Amino acid sequence: MAWAEWEQLKADASTRSGAQMQLNEAGPGGSGKKGDLAVNDTDLSGVRDEASKLNNRLWKEARVAVPTSETAAGDLTTQGFELGGALQHVAGRWDTQLKSLLDACGHIANHMDFTKYVHQGDDQYVRSRVSSIAALDQAFDDDNAPKGEKNKADN
């Protein structure tokens, strides 16, 4: 493509009022919704915070049942009640399930942090790619045209 042809295409594109490429938005009259890569840090932080709060509450409030149940199970067993073994089994199951739930809350919180980090990297990558397109476009300005082509573009 000759320099003059490129300049003519740019001029034609700038005078057109029809559809134009727009990045990360719906365009004039559209919904204004951001593109697919949009991640709301407030939402991610909210989910993370709630998972952390649940984790803390479970540790403080649900964990209390385990030592008292184990103590009661031991007392009942010592006194010859078969119910002591059953209560010990329930306390063990409660503790296992509680640990699973605590782990799940931790995974949710960590995943939200990881998601935020990954999407920030994606945003930076897209930004660098888009800015390199602008740099490429600048290379085709009249100021950068070869001397012979500059004169042809002026005619």
Image (spheres, rainbow, N blue to C red):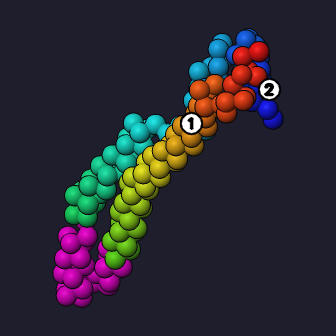
> Which residue in the structure is indicated by mark 2?
5
Q: Quadrant of residue 24?
A: top right
**What's the amino acid at mark 1?**
Ala
Q: Which residues are magenta?
A: 65-91
The x, y position of residue 151, in whole percent, is 71, 22
Q: Residue at x 18, y 81 (%)?
A: 75
Res. 50 in view: no
Mark 1 secondary-structure assignment: helix
Q: Position of residue 115 (x, y in %)?
A: 46, 51
Rate crowding at label 1 as few (under 14), some (14 to 19) or many (20 or more) other CA atoms within 10 Å: few
**Does residue 69 belong to the magenta stretch?**
yes
Q: Quadrant of residue 70?
A: bottom left
Query: Does residue 99 show up?
Result: yes
If the image is split into quadrants, where does the N terminus sit? top right
How would you rate the neighbour count of disc 2 (Cα within 10 Å): few for under 14, some for 14-19, many for 20 or more? few
Q: Percent x, y for residue 53?
A: 29, 49
Give the answer, above or below, for where 79 lies relative to 87. below
Residue 5 in the figure: left or right of residue 91: right
- Comparing 155 with 106, the one in front is 155
**Which image quadrant: the C terminus?**
top right
Identify the residue at horizontal 26%, vertical 55% (top origin): 56
Q: Please determine whether, in this image, residue 18 is positioned above or below residue 128.
A: above
Specify whether residue 40 is painted magenta.
no
* Residue at x-position 40% and y-position 68%: 100
Please give the label number shown on residue 135.
1
Among the two numbered marks 1 and 2 on one chain, the one whose residue lies closer to the N terminus: 2
**Dot in front, 1 or 2:** 2
Residue 9 is left or right of residue 125, and the answer is right
What type of secondary structure mainly makes up the magenta span?
helix
Identified by mark 2, the residue type is Glu
Q: Nearer the viewer, residue 53 or 44?
A: 44
